[in-house]
Image (cartoon, grey):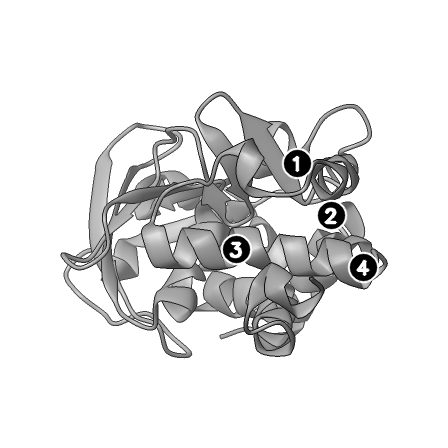
């Protein structure tokens, strides 16, 4: 792993999408609602409806780009309520989609399990399928060494949510297509997973702080 590159990638991702800062700046009640939505996803493997959360909390969290309300339900990074070309399944949890490639590598820590990830190369559309672990690095299998993530930072979310802007620039590439990119523009799965774990670490803190979700502030 290239620690310097990981630190730079994490710094740029947080600058482009300061999700942690936005959520932690909200009131205790709004933070509890955020955890309520996150815990629903973890427990049910599907999006809650908008009616599942207080309307005022949804308004705050959507404004902060911490929730994405769609006709399919409420998405919460890293879980996508809408279909994407990145899918995870492990035989216990029902298959779910993620907002971007980095998101797919951190859900395993929330599930506390390993899972099979199915996607495609963003450039050549080659199918990619491999097992990813919940630990500090993915579990290797036949495909793993050939997959990279292109994390193209410095994408502003000023005009639209990250799921429709920044996330579209964070994707998987096969080794052949990744080889044409500058080294600083691609990350191995292990490097990208570390970036994702650090980016979403605050969610684990909130899950511990609000073990009962909205009941904590009712």
Callout 2: SS: loop
In this rendering, is residue 175 above or below 195?
A: above
Earlier in the chain: of badge 2 and badge 1, it is 2
Residue corresponding to mark 3 = 38
Question: Pointers 2 and 1 in contact (CB under 8 A)?
Answer: yes
Instruction: Tell me what residue is drawn at x 54 percent, y 62 percent.
Output: 196
Earlier in the chain: of badge 3 and badge 1, it is 3
Q: In the rendering, which numbered label is found on residue 21?
A: 4
Q: In the rendering, which numbered label is found on residue 17?
A: 2
Callout 3: SS: helix
Q: Is residue 180 visible to the viewer in this orientation of the structure?
A: no
Among all residues in the image, which is located at the extreme front? 218
Gap in angstroms between the C-alphas marked 3 and 2: 18 Å
Earlier in the chain: of badge 4 and badge 1, it is 4
Q: Is residue 38 visible to the viewer in this orientation of the structure?
A: yes
Q: Position of residue 43 (x, y in %)?
A: 36, 58
Callout 4: SS: helix
* Mark 3 or 2, closer to the camera: 3
Q: Quadrant of the C terminus?
A: bottom right
Q: Position of residue 45 (x, y in %)?
A: 33, 49
Q: Where, by quadrant of the figure, is residue 82 drawn?
A: top left
In this rendering, is residue 150 above or below 205?
A: above
């Amino acid at each position: 792993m290239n620690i310097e590159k990981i630190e730079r990638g994490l710094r740029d991702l947080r600058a482009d999408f300061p999700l942690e800062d936005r959520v932690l700046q909200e009131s205790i009640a709004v933070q509890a609602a955020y955890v309520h939505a996150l815990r629903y996803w973890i427990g049910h493997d599907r999006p809650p409806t908008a009616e599942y959360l207080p309307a005022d909390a949804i308004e705050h969290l959507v404004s902060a780009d911490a929730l994405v309300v769609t006709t399919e339900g409420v998405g919460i990074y890293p879980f996508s309520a809408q279909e994407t070309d990145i899918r995870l399944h492990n035989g216990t949890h029902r298959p779910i989609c993620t907002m971007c490639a980095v998101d797919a590598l951190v859900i395993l820590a929330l599930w506390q399990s390993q899972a099979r990830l199915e996607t495609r190369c963003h450039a050549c559309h080659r199918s990619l399928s491999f097992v990813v672990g919940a630990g500090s690095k993915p579990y290797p299998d036949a495909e793993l060494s050939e997959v990279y993530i292109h994390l193209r930072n410095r994408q502003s979310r000023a005009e639209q949510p990250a799921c429709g802007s920044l996330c579209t620039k964070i994707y998987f590439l096969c080794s052949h297509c990744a080889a044409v990119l500058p080294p600083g523009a691609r990350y191995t799965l292990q490097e990208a997973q570390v970036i994702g774990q650090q980016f979403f670490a605050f969610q684990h803190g909130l899950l511990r702080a609000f073990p009962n979700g909205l009941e904590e502030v009712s």
